Amino acid sequence: MTTLADRYVAATLRSVPAPRREEIATELRASIQDMIEGRTDGGEETAAAEREVLTELGDPAQLAARYADRRLQLIGPRYYLAWERLLKLLLSFIPAMVGLVVGLVAATDGKSVGAAVGAGFASAFEVAVQIAFWVTLVFAVLERTNTPLHLPDWSVDQLPEAPVERQITLTDTAAAIGFLALFIAYLPLQHFRSFVPADGAGNLPVLDPALWSFWLPFLIAVLVASVGLEFAKYRAGRFTWPLVAVNAVLNLAFAVPVVWLMSADRLLNPDLVARFEWLREGHNLKTVTTVVVVTTILVVLWDTVDSVIKARRAAR
Amino acid sequence: MVSDDVLRTHLQELRRGTVVVASLIALRRPDYGYALLQRLTGHGFPVDANTLYPLLRRLEEQGLLTSEWNTEESRPRKFYRTSPDGEAMLDRLLADLTAVQTSMTALLEGVDR
């Protein structure tokens, strides 16, 4: 027996159950010798024949797995779906929840917003990795020990509802409402906290405080109505012509006052303009006005055209 | 034109299981691993050594084969032989193989190309 074949047999036996080891070793050794002889009888050199025979037998770990009737997989088809479903279920909410709680605790602990968000994301990631590892480990052990799960059999009652094709997705609606809510919150907020210190105490509002008599409440009302439109759009699932019309009216109701107030130099707080030398120099205020006016018109125009395109596509 | 890989996979699927039947038939005459491998290959049942050797042990554990060590020759060899249980199982398997062949023939005749 030469060293190569010896090493092969030893490597195979390493992962074969102990009680059968001796017998398998003797048989495998004899089989290898038989195979080598079969080749040397044909005129081959012994060393080359040995290499060829062992190469043909392949990875000893694989051969051992076949002897032990062990499956070479971490999680097989028997457990795979249960593993995948459980993992998806746990990952769908636990990391986000932990991240949120950790972030909130960090924020109330007096940390900066950035540090709190960072702490939240780090914890969420760590929890996700832990969940994935432990769930997979448990299922891998189940696979090795062949433990029955006793899960209820699949039945047709578990079939999900046929997916409804939505033009307006939940993500779109949530994003739009989130943006509108931030915008609505900003209007009163800028009055008290603009981060531009006033001469005395407090802050300088960005927008002209005189507008609170009518225009700012009006714009807030338009934005609130826009939130209502988002809900209506989501319920309808697609753009309909009445929705396009309401959308256009709301867009106009927002854009026209903004453009008009901005052009008449009535939108920005005069004290704020007076405060920044740069705004008073040359055409700078004019440039800001033009940028705001053009941006507002473009955004409103694009939104309206987009709604028409979507309504036409949905009507088809 | 189907790729060679696809063809190989399907042939493998078709051949799987026939090795068990062929082994049970061949081992009506007792033999050891390597000799059985040669005989099967000679009769048109090419089988990998690393498949056949573990398979023989498994069939033995299932009681379909019996074994005996022969120490008379140059090296000790384990001779396998089809057991009565293996014989009964073989009858069932052969009957099923015939049934498959019959059904396939009937299907071939019933369906025009």
Image (cartoon, coloured by chain):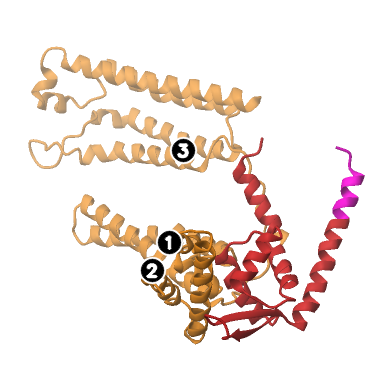
Q: Which residue is mark 3?
A: A227
The kind of residue on which mark 2 rests is Leu
Colour that chain A carries in the picture: orange
Q: Which mark is residue A51?
A: 1
Share a chain, discs 1 and 2?
yes
Q: Which of A224 and A86 lies nearest the eye of the viewer? A: A86
Nearer-the-camera pick, B87 or A104? B87
Residue A149 location, quadrant: bottom right
Q: Which chain is red?
A: B
What residue do we see at 73% from left, 82% from top? B83
Q: Chain of mark 2?
A: A
Element type at marker 2?
Answer: helix
Quarter of the picture holding the N terminus of chain B: top right
* Stretch of the chain drawn in magenta: B103-113
- Image point (30%, 61%), residue name: A123
Percent position of residue A85, x then y: 54, 61
Q: Quadrant of the C terminus of chain B?
A: top right
First reached walking from the N terminus: tag 3 or tag 2: 2
Q: Secondary structure at mark 1?
A: helix
Q: Position of residue A257 (x, y in %)?
A: 36, 21
Which residue carries the number 2 mark? A4
Relative horizontal placement of residue A60, taking residue B77 as reference (left or right) = left
Residues at marks 1 and 3, common chain?
A: yes
